[in-house]
Image (cartoon, rainbow, N blue to C red):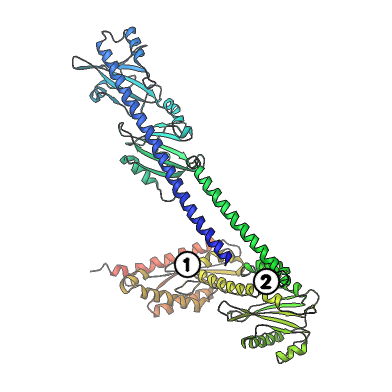
């Protein structure tokens, strides 16, 4: 009771703490992500508005200047450039030529159009390429004189340089900042990658469960505020990627942060985990002190049981997966033999479908017992335990003969036996130890592990049942595709001279399901399966698909295989069931894959031939008015 209470209490507290931690961390993560992105967005928007205002002031100075190429005028413009955003000042003239502090550039060299830019007034461009092939954006302000736009003052901002400057502005430089054109996915800023590119040209990223690439693409295009979590191709870790619209053109700002950075603030989490750990340690210490007290109190009465705990543990450990590793049974019986100093230990099943028995003999002391004697002894013990007896201790052959008439078998001097019962109390096995060397015989060593053997029989039954279910087709009873895939690995071991592959497809199953229902289709499949069993047996006959069957027939002459296939099709046609059959017979070295593919091709050829016959083509009949 104390153990159960402690376990329930510990699990309950663990679940509550983990739930609270999860909610707390998730909230902290996304709150900071939203906040950081929002701050960056507002900062960029404010700087853009500020730059526009400064450009308009400079444009007013240009409107008052008499000669735009005057060096004093450009010195005045440079003195007005008070932020880093206003860089590379130039003036676009109506003839599309460019005027800078260094001089005049001919029209067309930069590919700019005065007419297009003037029509937009004060504005900022999307990503463009300058004469050197670098990615830039340009911020324009009209130079208006007497109500007419006489030039366009603009500054050019180098985007790669801007990305470098912005690296330290998200999560203390541990995050990455992106500005993305929502129209085409082009990066205007990317502090993570070396080169600016296009977000869609990067390809689809591996997303965390619950997120998808289309969600990201649609959200960026529609100007949503949302986030996704994907795997970084650079680091292989999860990145939290939050995006929202900027009030500039159709741009979006996004911030991506590695998972370890998002969850870096763990002070509250650490305190909770430490408290939880202290609670666990206290519980374990209390439990350990209780065990010490109990062990000391029970030491005198339970000394022999305590001495055998290691033996019980080792037997239980061996029996834990003995349903898969049968050699562990022999090892477990060997340990029992050493504990009881017996010459022989046997374990018999009484309710499994197969007759399961396991026997260990002391080396050099094999009893001269026959299988018939063993069977008689076990039958006698089954009757003995069915009467309600919980153990059998026979210290001599005479005592055994008195308790079990007709016993003992040859060579048995004494015997211990205990029943192995299932969880419902029914007898499922018998554990027997022969010819013990102890002066005082006791069934205690057998009883202490009888439950473990009970669980072994239970696991063996479940294992065999699940194995059969996983390898059997529930409808037809044939081997299923799981068994087929497994048998392919061992297929070369099942033949000596030749191997045939018979590929069978049921014609008209889909039409039958549509017209008469799936029960009729199931009956058709069962009929085909039954006939396959009659012709080829069960061992290598499989249902590998909805209406597809496959049979491997080893070491049978080609003529006999063809005869069986004719018998199969003729019998089924008498039942108005049509199948397409492909047969490939081969001998010597061969490729399993090629063998199956050849049979499959022959089946499809037979199927096409079947459906070209309009008298038998049900699907064609349905199109005839």
Q: Give the residue displayed 40% in from the left and 40% down from the top.
A: 242
**Residue 397 visible in the picture:** yes
x and y percent of residue 121 in the render? 24, 23
Callout 2: SS: helix
Of the 4 image quadrants, the one containing the N terminus is bottom right
The residue positioned farthest toward the left in the image shown: 147
When the figure is inspected, residue 435 is found, relative to residue 587, above or below; the finding is below
When the figure is inspected, residue 441 is found, relative to residue 585, above or below; the finding is below
Task: Tell me whether circle 1 and circle 2 mark residues in contact (CB < 8 Å).
Answer: no
**Mark 1 — residue?**
544
- The mark closer to the camera, 1 or 2, is 2
Q: Give the residue displayed 74% in from the left and 88% down from the top.
A: 400
The label on residue 329 is 2
Out of 621 and 517, give the one closest to the viewer.
Answer: 517
Out of 500 and 395, give the one closest to the viewer.
Answer: 395
When the figure is inspected, residue 606 is found, relative to residue 65, above or below; the finding is below
The label on residue 231 is none
x and y percent of residue 435 in the render? 77, 80
């Amino acid at each position: 009771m104390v153990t159960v209470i402690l376990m329930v209490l510990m699990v309950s507290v663990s679940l509550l703490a983990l739930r609270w931690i999860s909610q707390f961390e998730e909230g902290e993560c996304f709150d900071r992500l939203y906040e950081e992105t929002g701050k960056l967005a507002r900062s960029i928007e404010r700087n853009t508005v500020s730059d526009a205002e400064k450009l308009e002031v400079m444009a007013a100075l240009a409107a008052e200047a008499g000669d735009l190429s005057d060096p004093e005028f450009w010195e005045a413009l440079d003195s007005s450039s008070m932020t880093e955003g206003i860089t590379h000042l130039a003036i676009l003239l109506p003839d599309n030529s460019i005027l800078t502090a260094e001089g005049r550039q001919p029209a067309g060299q930069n590919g700019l159009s005065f007419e297009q830019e003037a029509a937009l007034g004060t504005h900022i461009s999307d990503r463009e390429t300058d004469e050197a092939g670098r990615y830039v954006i340009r911020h324009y302000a009209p130079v208006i004189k007497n109500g007419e736009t006489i030039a366009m003052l603009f500054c050019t901002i180098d985007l790669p340089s801007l990305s470098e400057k912005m690296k330290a502005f998200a999560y203390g430089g541990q995050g990455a900042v992106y500005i993305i054109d929502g129209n085409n996915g082009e990066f205007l800023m990317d502090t993570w990658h070396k080169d600016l590119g296009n977000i869609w040209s990067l390809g689809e990223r591996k997303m965390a469960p619950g997120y998808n690439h289309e969600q990201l693409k649609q959200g960026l295009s529609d100007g949503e505020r949302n986030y996704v979590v994907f795997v970084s191709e650079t680091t292989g870790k999860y990145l939290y990627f939050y995006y929202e619209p900027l009030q500039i053109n159709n741009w979006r700002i996004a911030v991506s942060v590695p998972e370890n950075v998002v969850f870096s603030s763990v002070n509250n989490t650490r305190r909770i985990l430490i408290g939880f750990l202290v609670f666990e340690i206290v519980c374990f210490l209390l439990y350990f002190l209780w065990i010490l007290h109990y062990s000391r109190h029970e030491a005198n009465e339970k000394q022999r049981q305590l001495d055998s705990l290691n033996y019980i543990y080792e037997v239980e450990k061996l029996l834990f997966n003995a349903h898969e590793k049968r050699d562990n049974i022999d090892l477990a019986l060997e340990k029992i033999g050493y504990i009881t100093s017996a010459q022989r230990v046997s374990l018999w099943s009484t309710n499994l479908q197969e007759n399961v028995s396991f026997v260990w003999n002391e080396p050099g002391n094999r009893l001269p017992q026959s299988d018939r004697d063993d069977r008689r002894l076990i039958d006698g013990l089954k009757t003995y335990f069915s009467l309600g007896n919980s153990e059998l201790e026979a210290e001599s052959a005479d005592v055994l003969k008195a308790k079990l008439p007709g016993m003992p078998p040859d060579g048995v001097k004494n015997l211990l036996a205990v029943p192995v019962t299932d969880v419902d109390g029914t007898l499922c096995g018998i554990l027997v130890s022969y010819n013990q060397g102890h002066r005082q015989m006791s069934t205690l060593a057998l009883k202490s592990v009888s439950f473990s053997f009970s669980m072994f029989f239970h696991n063996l039954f479940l294992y065999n049942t699940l194995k059969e279910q996983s390898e059997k087709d529930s409808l037809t009873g044939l081997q299923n595709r799981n068994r087929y895939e497994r048998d392919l690995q061992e297929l070369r071991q099942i033949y000596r001279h030749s191997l045939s592959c018979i590929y069978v497809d049921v014609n008209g199953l889909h039409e039958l399901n549509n017209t008469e229902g799936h029960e009729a289709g199931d009956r058709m499949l069962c009929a085909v399966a039954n006939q396959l069993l009659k012709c080829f047996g069960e061992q290598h006959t499989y249902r590998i698909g909805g209406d597809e069957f496959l049979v491997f027939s080893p070491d049978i002459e080609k003529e006999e295989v063809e005869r069986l296939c004719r018998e199969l099709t003729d019998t089924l046609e008498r039942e108005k069931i049509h199948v397409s059959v492909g047969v490939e017979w081969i001998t010597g070295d061969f490729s399993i894959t090629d063998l199956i593919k050849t049979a499959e091709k022959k089946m499809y050829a037979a199927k096409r031939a079947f459906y070209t016959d309009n008298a038998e083509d049900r699907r064609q009949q349905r199109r005839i008015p």
